Image (cartoon, grey):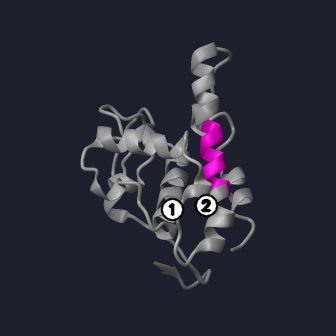
Amino acid sequence: MYDPKAQEPYLIDADLGKSVNKLGTPSSNPRTGTLPFMAIDLLVEAPPPHLYRHDLESFFYVLVWICAEDYHGWHRVDSVTDMAETKSYFLIPFDIEQLRVGKFVELKATWTTKLHCLFVIGVAQRLLWNKRKGPPFDNETLGGSVTYETFLEAIDDSP
């Protein structure tokens, strides 16, 4: 869509709008969208409430999809469980430098690599916290790694 007043484009999914019940929680299913682009946390049988960082993670996967010549099997996975496993491998042991790209070498070198680091660090922090059980973990931002600010900072270098 396009806002003529602000002269800016914006995304809208009016068909996926959520009503909020009296407790302030969404009444709809938090898992909507296309499997390859969904946040890993939502790829479980009973997904948690949708968080802002899930949208940021989805943007990252769309960016990878645009840049990549090899989709790491994402386009062949039909089950939610298999997609979660495939994406988990992509985040933690995967070296983003191995991602083969076509025309978007500069985009991969800047945005894709930096955003991958945000999510890898956040997921690693959560894994370490689960082993140590310290003070409450900030799951909403993966320990402060994935916020609006850190995301914008990561993509500040325009490709």
Query: For mark 1, what is the residue?
Result: 64
Badge 2 vs badge 1, beta-carbon distance below 8 Å:
yes
- Residue ID at (45%, 68%): 69
Category of crowding for the residue at label 1, using alpha-carbon neighbours closer than 10 angstroms: few (below 14), some (14–19), many (at least 20) = many
Dot 2 falls on a residue whose secondary structure is helix
Name the residue that disc number 2 marks. 112
Please say whether residue 117 is one of the residues in the magenta stretch.
yes
Q: Residue at x 46, y 40 (%)?
A: 88
Q: Quadrant of the N terminus?
A: bottom left
Point out residue 51 in the picture as x, y percentages from the top left corner. 50, 43
Residue 93 image position (x, y, % from top left):
55, 40
Q: Is residue 43 magenta?
A: no
Look at the magenta stretch and give its main secondary structure: helix
Name the image quarter holding residue 34.
bottom left
Q: Which residues are magenta?
A: 114-122
Q: Give SS at disc 1.
A: helix
**Circle nearer the N terminus (2, 1):** 1
Q: Residue furthest left?
A: 78
